[in-house]
Image (spheres, rainbow, N blue to C red):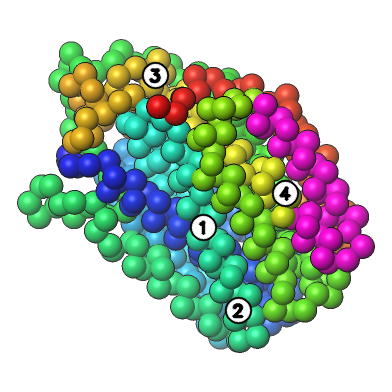
Amino acid sequence: MRISSLTGARIAVAAAFFAQGFVFISLTTRLPRFLEQWGLDEVALSLLLLMMVLLAGVGSLVAERAAHRVGSAPMLRLGLALMVVAVPAITLAPAVGFFVGGVALYGIALGLVDATSNMQAVDLEHRYGRPILPSSHGYWTTGGIIAAAIALATGHLSPEVGAFVAVVPLAIAFARFVPRVVPGADVGPGVDVVPPHQTAPSDAAPVPTPVPWKPIWLVGAGLVVFYMVDTTASTWGPVYLARSFDAPGNLVALATFPYLVTSIVVRLAGGALVTRFGVTPLLRIGAVVASGALALVALAPTWQVAVAGFTVLGAAVALVAPLSFSAAGRIAAGPTADGPAAGDATTDGTPADGTTSAEPDRARTDAVIARFNQFNYVGALLGAVLTGFVGADNLRLGFALPAVLVLALVPLAPAFARGALSRR
C-alpha cells in the first residue's frame, strides 16, 4: 500500500499518540475521586495498577504477534476501539466489579496502543531519516496537557463526566487521516507501507542478521527508569497532593499539568536539542536534574513546592522515552537503518535509491519494538506498585526511591546514542 505523502502518515501517528496521552491522563487525574468513590487505599490501588500493567504487557505481546500477520495499523485501531469501551466502564461503573473490569480492559488497550503506535513512529522515522520520535511522543504529552486542563476545569463535577473522554479515541480510531491510494482501501491511524505477507524482490531484501539484544537491553534499562519516574509522577502525583497536603480536590491535577507542559516544550524541541548537544549529554544532565526535582517533591513543605518539583521533573526526563524507542528501532534495523532505505525518501514514501521496503525487515523491527515496549511496563510496575507499597504509610518515601534510581541514566546514556540520526 503506497502513500502519496509521508505527511498524512505523520498526522495519523501523531493522532494516535495524542489519543493515548489524553485518555491516560484523564484517568490518572481522577484517581483520587475513584479512591474515594470505591473506598480504596494506597495498597489496593497498587494491586489494581499491578493488574493493569500486567495486562498491558499482554496487550503488547498480542500486538507483536498480530502485527506480523495483519499489520500494526489495524491493531492500533483495535486498541483505540477497546479504549472506547473501557473508559465508560471505568467512569460509569455501577459497582466496584465493573470498575475493575474496565481497568482490566483498559490495560489490554494500553498495551496494544503503546506497542503499535511506537512501531508506526519508528518506521516513519526511518523513512524520514531524521528524529521524529521526540515530537511524536510530544503529541502524547499534548493530549495529556489538554486532559489535565479539562480535569482542572471540571474537577468540581461528578466522575461520570469522564465518560466523554472516550469520544477522542473513537474519533481517531475511525478517522481517515491517510489518503486512499488503493480503491476501496481503508487506511486509519498509522500506515502499513507494505501490505501484510507481501515481500520485496529477492535482490532488494537485505541479508538477515541476528538482533543485537545486548545494546537493546541497555537502552531498555533506561526506559525502565523513565517509566518508573513517569508513572510515579503521573499516577501518584495527584494522590500525593490530595493525601499528603490536603490540596483542594479541583487542583490535584496540578501535579500532572505543569509536568506535561514542560515535557511538551522539551519534546517538541527534541530534534534540534539532540542535533546541537548530542544524546548522551542531554540524558546525563536530565538525570541529575530529575533526581533533584524528585528530592524536592519528597521534601516539599507545601503542595505548591511539590508542584514546582513536578514541573522541573517533566523537562528533565522528557526525552528519555522517545530517544529510547528511536535507539531500539535503529539497533533492530541494523546497518541499513543509516543507509538510503532509512534515510531520504521520495514523495511516495519509497527510499531514495528506488528500492522497496521488505515486509520481513519491517516485521523484524516491529517485533523488536513490541518486545522493547515491555520495558515500559517493568518501569510502570516499579513506579505504580513500589511507590504505593513503599509509601503506604508516607508517600514522601515513595518519591524518594525514584530520586535515587533515576541516576542510573547517567551510565546508561551512551547506549542511547548508537547510530543516532541527525536532523537534516
Relative side of 391 to 355, left or right: right
| Residue 375 position (above or below residue 255) | above
Name, please, the residue furthest toward the left. 183
Q: Please, what secondary structure does the residue beneath circle 1 have?
A: helix
Question: For mark 4, does the 10 Å Cα neighbourhood hold few (<14), some (14 to 19), or many (20 or more) residues?
Answer: many
Q: Which residue is mark 3?
A: 338
* Number of the label disc, if any, that sits on residue 153: 2
Mark 3 in CB contact with mark 4 (< 8 angstroms): no
Task: Tell me where residue 217 appears, x and y as whole percent.
Answer: 59, 27
Q: Which residue is mark 1?
A: 142
Q: Earlier in the sequence, mark 3 or mark 4?
A: 4
Cα–Cα gap, marks 2 and 3: 46 Å
Q: Earlier in the sequence, mark 2 or mark 3?
A: 2
Cα–Cα gap, marks 3 and 1: 30 Å
Q: What amino acid is at disc 4?
A: Leu
Q: Earlier in the sequence, mark 1 or mark 4?
A: 1
Task: Tell me where residue 266 appears, x and y as whole percent.
Answer: 59, 44
Q: Quadrant of residue 394?
A: bottom right
Q: Please, what secondary structure does the residue beneath circle 4 have?
A: helix
